[in-house]
Image (tube, grey):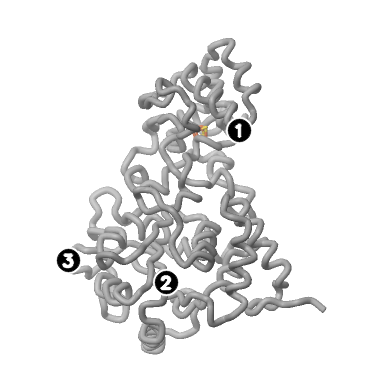
Amino acid sequence: MVERSLLTPNLSRRDFVKALGTITTALGLPMTMATDAAEAASNVDNRPPVIWLHFQECTGCTEAVLKATHPSPAELILELVNLCYQESLMADFGHGAEELLEKAMKKYAGKYILIIEGSIPLKDNGVYCKIGGKTAIDILKHVSASAAAVINLGICATSGGIASAGSNPTGAVGAPELLPEGIPYISLPGCPPNPYNLLGVIMYLLNFNKLPDMDSKKRPLFAYGTLIHEYCERRAHFDAGRFAKEFGDEGHRNGFCLYKLGCKGPETHANCSAIKFNEGIVWPIGNGNPCIGCTEGDVLFKESLFTYAKVAQPRLSSNVPPAQQEDLGDRATASQGVLVGAIIGAAVGAGAVYASKLSKEPEDENK
Ligand code: SF4
């Protein structure tokens, strides 16, 4: 007899735990988290209540969670949490939805996780985003006041996103600017953020009853601890000085590095290259699109798409000589790239490949 998990009739418990195990491995989280999280969630009463609010956004973050499959993060997340309020998914609307929100807040006061999607417009007293006659400012302050912790999902919620670009006509800001002082929160920027990183944070909360270690921008280190440039599949081309110069040129067709098309991978922290999107098989750079820095509030829509990214030395082990840890400036020369590549290659066990490049200083083969 197949043992079924609690909420989703199509997902056996074995598959559920297996899927969680695959994801914890991919995210570099402790292996035991999968079984422990599944065990904790097997009692519905243990599942953390979640209230998920939408503000000034495109619902792309929700779509990213819903549209992925094999395993579906939506299925897995719904197995792990008690989703009390989510405007895109719930059947209630209008006054019924508002009552549901108030009931959930009252029932789980001080215990619920608040997920925020979208930016909050401050200009003109917040008139540019109103739900049920209330501004996003007032709703956020009201609902976050009783939350146990907050997850800012997507670049709009973390730092304003596209609504804050250019002249920022609505005065859009990220949720952290309005959250009550002292409330624990974590940010998962991206456009969209990778849904498996949300799953990882929820599993971590279930296991340890606290938020995972974060960087200075409050992003979990397990997901945002490395630069995209460090593990990019086109990195060998960067190191060898092989660049696409125009979309559709020979270099682009051959999968060369997208640095000269404005790729922001060298200054963008995220694990996209490791876990990817849509079944874990595609991601922007893999598809030929330069990284636009969507996990960095001070890069996305702030730096021109066609300026060269700053190439900082990737963080490597402490035995990297200090001279090699210096910022390489806003233009990476081929020889510097080769040196950095050699260090990374050694660090990941591919030193021989890169070391062979040290014997000669490669030219930009696309000149
Ligand atoms: S510049 Fe962009 S495409 Fe090139 S290796 Fe770095 S992250 Fe990859």
The residue at label 1 has a CB less than 8 Å from ligand 1? no
The answer to whether 141 is drawn above or below residue 278 in the figure is below
Question: Residue at horizontal 63%, vertical 79%?
Answer: 7
Foreground mark, 2 or 3, reads 2
- Horizontal and vertical percent position of residue 158: 35, 57
Calculate the distance from the C-alpha at mark 3 to the C-alpha at mark 1: 52 Å
Question: Residue at horizontal 62%, vertical 52%?
Answer: 25
Which amino acid type is marked by label 1? Val
Question: Residue at horizontal 51%, vertical 57%?
Answer: 197
The residue at label 2 has a CB less than 8 Å from ligand 1? no
Question: Residue at horizontal 46%, vertical 47%?
Answer: 224
The answer to whether 110 is drawn above or below residue 26 in the figure is below
Of the pair 106 and 122, the residue shown nearer to us: 106
Label 1, on which residue?
A: 348
* Secondary element at tag 3: helix
Which amino acid type is marked by label 3? Asp
* Secondary element at tag 1: loop
Foreground mark, 3 or 1, reads 1
- Horizontal and vertical percent position of residue 34: 62, 63
- Horizontal and vertical percent position of residue 248: 55, 32
Label 3, on which residue?
A: 124
Of the pair 83 and 162, the residue shown nearer to us: 83
Calculate the distance from the C-alpha at mark 2 to the C-alpha at mark 3: 29 Å
- Horizontal and vertical percent position of residue 209: 47, 67
The answer to whether 50 is drawn above or below residue 71 in the figure is below
Residue 113's label in the rendered image is 2
Q: Earlier in the sequence, mark 1 or mark 2?
A: 2
Rate crowding at label 3 as few (under 14), some (14 to 19) or many (20 or more) other CA atoms within 10 Å.
few
Rate crowding at label 1 as few (under 14), some (14 to 19) or many (20 or more) other CA atoms within 10 Å.
few
Is residue 242 at all visible to an observer of this figure?
no
